[in-house]
Image (cartoon, coloured by chain):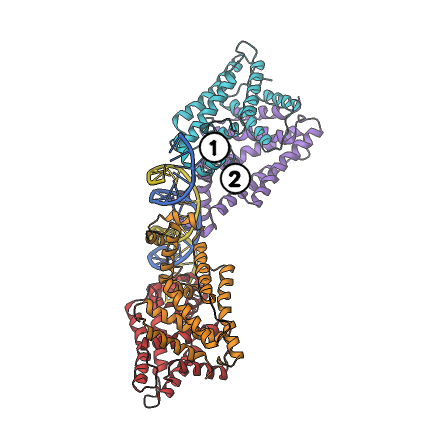
Chain colours: A red, B orange, C cyan, D purple, E blue, F yellow
Amino acid sequence: MKTLNKRDNIMKSALALFAERGFDATTVPMIATEANVGAGTIYRYFENKEVLVNTLFQNYVNMFTKTIEDGFPFDQTIRKQFHHIFKSMILFTNQNEHAIYFIKKHSAGHFLNDQSQTDFTQLLNFFRTFFNTGKQKSVIRNLPSEALIAILYGAFIELQNLVRAGELDVDQDLLLGIEESLWDSVRQQ
Amino acid sequence: MKTLNKRDNIMKSALALFAERGFDATTVPMIATEANVGAGTIYRYFENKEVLVNTLFQNYVNMFTKTIEDGFPFDQTIRKQFHHIFKSMILFTNQNEHAIYFIKKHSAGHFLNDQSQTDFTQLLNFFRTFFNTGKQKSVIRNLPSEALIAILYGAFIELQNLVRAGELDVDQDLLLGIEESLWDSVRQQ
Amino acid sequence: MKTLNKRDNIMKSALALFAERGFDATTVPMIATEANVGAGTIYRYFENKEVLVNTLFQNYVNMFTKTIEDGFPFDQTIRKQFHHIFKSMILFTNQNEHAIYFIKKHSAGHFLNDQSQTDFTQLLNFFRTFFNTGKQKSVIRNLPSEALIAILYGAFIELQNLVRAGELDVDQDLLLGIEESLWDSVRQQ
Amino acid sequence: MKTLNKRDNIMKSALALFAERGFDATTVPMIATEANVGAGTIYRYFENKEVLVNTLFQNYVNMFTKTIEDGFPFDQTIRKQFHHIFKSMILFTNQNEHAIYFIKKHSAGHFLNDQSQTDFTQLLNFFRTFFNTGKQKSVIRNLPSEALIAILYGAFIELQNLVRAGELDVDQDLLLGIEESLWDSVRQQ
DNA sequence: AATGAATGAGGCTTCATTCAT
DNA sequence: TATGAATGAAGCCTCATTCAT
């Protein structure tokens, strides 16, 4: 934490608190205390609390999108692509504690601005395209892509929530089992 | 709405607002306006805002539990039991708009009292027992029951969220397809 | 309490509660409950809470004044007159539980109207006249009458407060002792 | 008032308003206005209104106790000790406008915590001990110490109330006269 | 006449935001 | 640039008062 600059420190602290308590139950002084800065300092880096949450949201949603897009094997099988997505989701959650839960908890927030919503849609669009392609190739189940996204995303988030709460220990076998389960829920049988 | 008494009216309005905005972002005057009562009237029926949210939570969690337990075919196949559960979840969401999303959004709330948490655990326990039984019979996938619950519950909630947002129209075919998808995610293959 | 009409019942209950908790800490519903009437009923007999407290105040202040004036031995010695006053104060407090304490607690209240203040002044004037006469006859100490009133009244009230709190049991001997003490505090030595 | 810091300013304003109107009839915004601070500022220094009134109460009760105990002539006559007490009471009221009346008005308040009551009892205990000693030496009247306290305290407070209201101007002669009156009320004759 | 459910003004308190240091 | 004391708008809640029954 010593190597972070003040802005990153604030974002890191805000992320953890928003994920834990939610936007409305997190006060600015709480964030300041957690970040070891004065409350006023936060306003040097973020115009107000809403700007802070939107900045965080866009930051992590875009990072999530990039993680999935990065090295995506467009020329391989749908199953391999699915594996890449799953692996990327795991990677993102491992590298960014709290981030997935923060995104989930706030993705319908009353304080999100247009940009945040656009960025979130872009993330979903990646999944949408993936499922559309898979359905064309008759590898993915013939369900609306919205529904497939909901199933994959909803299940994944809920699983991460368990991990976060310490109610589920993840090892390689479990990951494989979960990947298989989620794949089975979306693939054409 | 005309046939509801004031208490039910308040609960109905609070349910919708809590589901939409969350507990912390919903003000008591908002609920009062939505319910067409004075702000003070709410306090004739509920000691305070926390009591209101806990009453709502317990009410709907228990109703959900009862809906699933009601007519549960203990002596039939796991698949038939799964069908009952799925049908019950659909039934509950159809009969209680907002309720599932309200439960989801608040099931880790900082304002939930012990009774609310106990009631929620009881709901999860029903699922847990079901999955345990299914795994013993080698019909359900060999994953921790927590994980199986998360997958089924997470996916289902996310789907309902879509329906609620009007982004998914449900017809009989779609329901069948979703049930199949969810079943495939938990069954032993 | 059964033989009282509703209005008297309300006054009796209000007196006890005002004496115990004070005007501001006593709610109208409290008075209603104590009087076994509906809250709305109070407003049939008293325009509002302030009118109620002023009615009570004037009622008991005037009753106090009358009790002292009644049978006052104008043609006897100052000491005998003092005895009459003391006896009357005891009589009044015995016949009207709470009343003295209610008067004391509220005699500088922000809610008292002109009539209440006039009535209270009239009570004090009786004492003033008594002390003035006594000073003319060189029987009473040469102190401002205001001060003499304060000494007699303040000490008496505080003593009643003790009795009311059950910290002092009154018998004939104690009364004689107190009367002697108070007389010594005002008489010319 | 310029030389006071904010906390003292708030206490000073609260003291005056509580003495004048009582705890229940004094609003926090009133105190804020009187102290020339924002309403929220009061909560930086006092957890809530009850903590404020208890802090004030303990502060002034203990100051009163200390003023009386300070330099108390244990080895001199009861009359000299009485003089010390009287002088101390005058000194305290002169140095702390409103304080005596504030103490009087709130010493049976429903909002007083245990510490406040303990502190007040300690003040009364000083008087109790004084009167007990005096009775043993047959210098003080043979009345319950509770009653003697009530007489001295009640009369004194009521006198101060007059001074406070501007209805009594105090000069050296008056003070001597009052002291003599109060002494005569408690001494063995 | 009596009731008590309903109301909403106003009190206590929190907290996002500002600004003097 | 950084701070945190100060502010006051707004939220929760109480209770004097009204009014339909």
Mark toward the viewer: 1 or 2: 1
Which residue matches tag 1?
Answer: C14
Instruction: Specify the amino acid type for callout 1.
Output: Ala
CA gap between label 1 and label 2 equals 18 Å
x then y, percent, for residue C129: 48, 16
In the image, residue B146 sits, relative to residue A71, either above or below, namely above
Occupied quadrant, residue D146: top right
Where does label 2 land, which residue? D109
Q: Give the answer, above or below, for where A124 lies relative to A17.
A: below
The kind of secondary structure element at disc 1 is helix
Using the rendered view, name the quadrant where residue A63 is placed: bottom left
One can see residue A1 in this view? no
Q: Chain of mark 1?
A: C
Q: Are marks 1 and 2 on the same chain?
A: no
Observer-nearest of C66 and B17: B17
Label 1 close to label 2 by CB (< 8 Å): no
